Image (spheres, coloured by chain):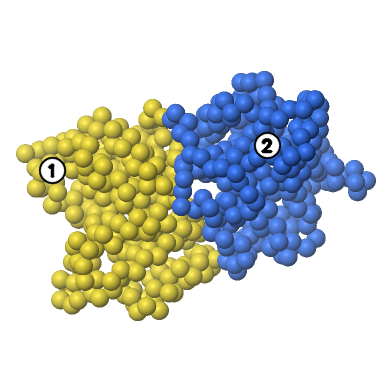
Chain colours: A blue, B yellow
Amino acid sequence: MADNRAIGIFDSGLGGLTVLAAIKKKFPNENLIYFGDTARVPYGSKSRETVIRYSLEIQDFLVEQNVKMIVVACNTASSHALDEMRKKYDIPVLGVVEPGVMALTKQQQILEQKIEKAAVIATRSTIKSGSYDAALKKINPEVYLYSKACPLLVPLIEEGFTDRKATEMILREYLDEIIREDIHYIILGCTHYPLLKGMMQRLYPSITLIDSSVETATMMEGLLNVNGLKNESTNNGFIKLFVSDITDSLLDMEKLFFGGTIDSVEKVSLGW
Amino acid sequence: MADNRAIGIFDSGLGGLTVLAAIKKKFPNENLIYFGDTARVPYGSKSRETVIRYSLEIQDFLVEQNVKMIVVACNTASSHALDEMRKKYDIPVLGVVEPGVMALTKQQQILEQKIEKAAVIATRSTIKSGSYDAALKKINPEVYLYSKACPLLVPLIEEGFTDRKATEMILREYLDEIIREDIHYIILGCTHYPLLKGMMQRLYPSITLIDSSVETATMMEGLLNVNGLKNESTNNGFIKLFVSDITDSLLDMEKLFFGGTIDSVEKVSLGW
């Protein structure tokens, strides 16, 4: 059965375009609607209550756009708002936390070897939420998870400082303690972090980085199949971008995190 | 004539508490109401239109609190929203841009020497607005102003990285070009920047830093007098803090930017 309704994707800002890119790559024929809450970005330093309020408002908007599924491409929103969102409408809602954690389990199966400990790096709010611990407890309770908030990485990435010595020093300040704990798996718990993969691999060659954007796209495959939601068209799907503020850096960010073709960009006020 | 109504101060977040601190120091008997828009911070990366909308909402709130004067302790809001705010109500509205520029003129008078060029460092949005150029053109058109956006300084300061080597490197990347231009006066065009004064002075000992928070408090003296708004009470005034989100870092930020006694903290939703 074909379902050509769009998939809705949202993030606090434009970092979630890394997730959109992974989804587009895996499902080129699906229609994609992305909402970036650029008028209130970032969520990572805001309270749970506020993040839930914002997420439900965006969900309302995406439902009005008649989406068949929602991907919360924001770790902070995934950490706080999934339960409330799933209660509100009868549409599948997938976050980026579970896929990251599932990837660890997959790694274990591939290696046929137990992973004893892993780390997750993310914004302060995501770490504080304990969402990665909670997901791991359900899926793979034997892994000890080391959590580290890295609040400076997002601004450094947004400034394009991905090759600077200063960024390397800050990254070392955040990650050296993980390496000292003899941890070999790091989940990138923020949509921006894939842009620092190169530097991280250079600094710590023995580490395996788990990129939630790729894992999320992989997990969607099953969800689309199970729910009979796949678009069977062989045409290329559209990508529509909605934002709550047209900022000066919009185009730069779009290029930084996506780089592909976006069919339309529109500003919307969500009635706040 | 005594006027014991409070002075309203607002900022996108809590950085403006440096301005509140300077005002409190100069006018210990004035009652102060501070609003920090912590649910939508930062403004520095948002559009003019959005910054104006947010500022007018906050002005409405402060007017409801019966303030006698409003200080816009946010460079971004001062750059974009002053005209609209001054049109809306018959209450004096003072921003932080003019006082910073006035200080240059004062320096000239003290030194009895022409200042040929100066620099302003600020957020991307403040620089883009051209507000410092515009103010200088009115007040002191002969000074050539060199403008530099330094978007990483706010997150570095909020992370408490004010003594780190990485911060020094980033600061050098931003400021070396100003020094190469043989500029000796730098206006700190963001409420956070006074916290890096020590490092800046150490790196560039010959530079004179102009701290808008201090200059704003100085300029208020005249405004309160001229408008007959001074509180003649000899008692210590109250400080009430309102925020749009109670975040985890609220207390840390309060300590970082103020450190004094705040009488009450309350969360308000501005109807958005």
The kind of residue tagged 2 is Asn
The kind of residue tagged 1 is Lys
The spot of residue B85 in percent (x, y) is 25, 41
Which residue sits at x=19%, y=76%? B114
In the picture of the structure, the residue carrying the numbered disc 1 is B230
In the rendered image, which quarter contains the C terminus of chain B? top left
Using the rendered image of the protein, determine whether residue A169 is visible from the camera's viewpoint. no
The spot of residue A68 in percent (x, y) is 68, 27
Crowd band around label 2 with a 10 angstrom C-alpha radius: few (<14), some (14–19), many (20+): many
In the picture of the structure, the residue carrying the numbered disc 2 is A31
Circle 2/circle 1 CB separation < 8 Å: no
Question: Circle 1 sits in a helix, a strand or a loop, which is it?
Answer: loop
Report the front residue among A259 and B59: A259
Q: Chain of mark 1?
A: B
Alpha carbon distance from label 2 to label 1: 62 Å
Which residue sits at x=90%, y=43%? A109
Residue B136 drawn above or below residue A9: below
Using the rendered image of the protein, determine whether residue B138 is visible from the camera's viewpoint. yes
The spot of residue B134 in percent (x, y) is 26, 59
Q: Quadrant of residue A234?
A: top right
Tell whether A80 sits left or right of A111.
Answer: left
